[in-house]
Amino acid sequence: MKFDSKILGIFGLFLVLFISGCGSQRSGLNVSLSTNEYIYHSADEMRLNTTIFCSMCPEHPENVAITVRGILDRRGNYRIKEDRQVILNSEKNNEEFVFLMPRCYGCAGVSPGKYNIRVDIIKNKTKIWNGSVEIYLETNRN
């Protein structure tokens, strides 16, 4: 079987582009998550900072949605919940989310313990990044 060098060259170029990530929605996107504390108490303020590094965004701004979910109560409702539309237009994009911690007893339906706060970045109805940060919720300050 004889191979045509043009076809082999085109296939090689396609393979290099595919491996390098060109055309991938994830290329050039890196995300860092942090909170102002690890241990929170009832009614404390939590600041969740997302830093999105996007090497292509200064030339090609991206319109994305950031969703934050965490602390599921006994009724199946998220006590930490926000959706935000943002335009990534620089290499380093910062978004801060501020929440009040729920009470850990009674009708709040939340128990003390470890919780993950999940962050998803969505573009054109497709999740292009997801991650989480762990926090610990306590009832009262001593």
Image (cartoon, rainbow, N blue to C red):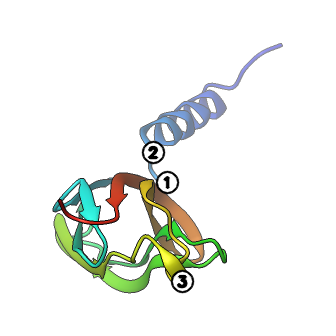
The quarter of the picture where residue 44 lies is bottom left
Q: Give the x, y percent position of residue 131.
A: 43, 53
Most extreme residue toward the top is: 1
Q: CA distance from mark 2 to mark 1?
A: 5 Å
Helix, strand or loop at disc 2? loop
Q: Residue 13 versus residue 34: which sits nearer the camera?
A: 34
Q: CA distance from mark 3 to mark 1?
A: 46 Å
Q: Is residue 53 above or below residue 41?
A: above
> Quick check: 32 left or right of 84?
left
Helix, strand or loop at disc 1? loop
Type of amino acid at the residue the image marks with label 2: Gly
Q: Give the x, y percent position of residue 78.
A: 53, 76
Residue marked by disc 3: 107
Label drawn at residue 24: 1
> Quick check: 86 left or right of 34?
right
Give the class, few, some or many, for how many residues have Cα within 10 Å of label 2's Cα (few <14, many ≥20): few
At a point 17% along the width and 64% down the height, the residue shown is 91
CB contact under 8 Å: marks 3 and 1: no
At a point 49% along the width and 54% down the height, the residue shown is 24
Type of amino acid at the residue the image marks with label 1: Ser
Type of amino acid at the residue the image marks with label 3: Cys
CB contact under 8 Å: marks 2 and 1: yes
At a point 22% along the width and 61% down the height, the residue shown is 35
Q: Quadrant of the C terminus?
A: bottom left
Q: Give the x, y percent position of residue 127.
A: 55, 64
Nearer to us: label 2 or label 3: 3
Q: Quadrant of the N terminus?
A: top right
Q: Is residue 62 above or below residue 13?
A: below
Label drawn at residue 21: 2
Q: Residue 86 versus residue 10: which sits nearer the camera?
A: 86
Q: Residue 104 versus residue 132: which sits nearer the camera?
A: 104
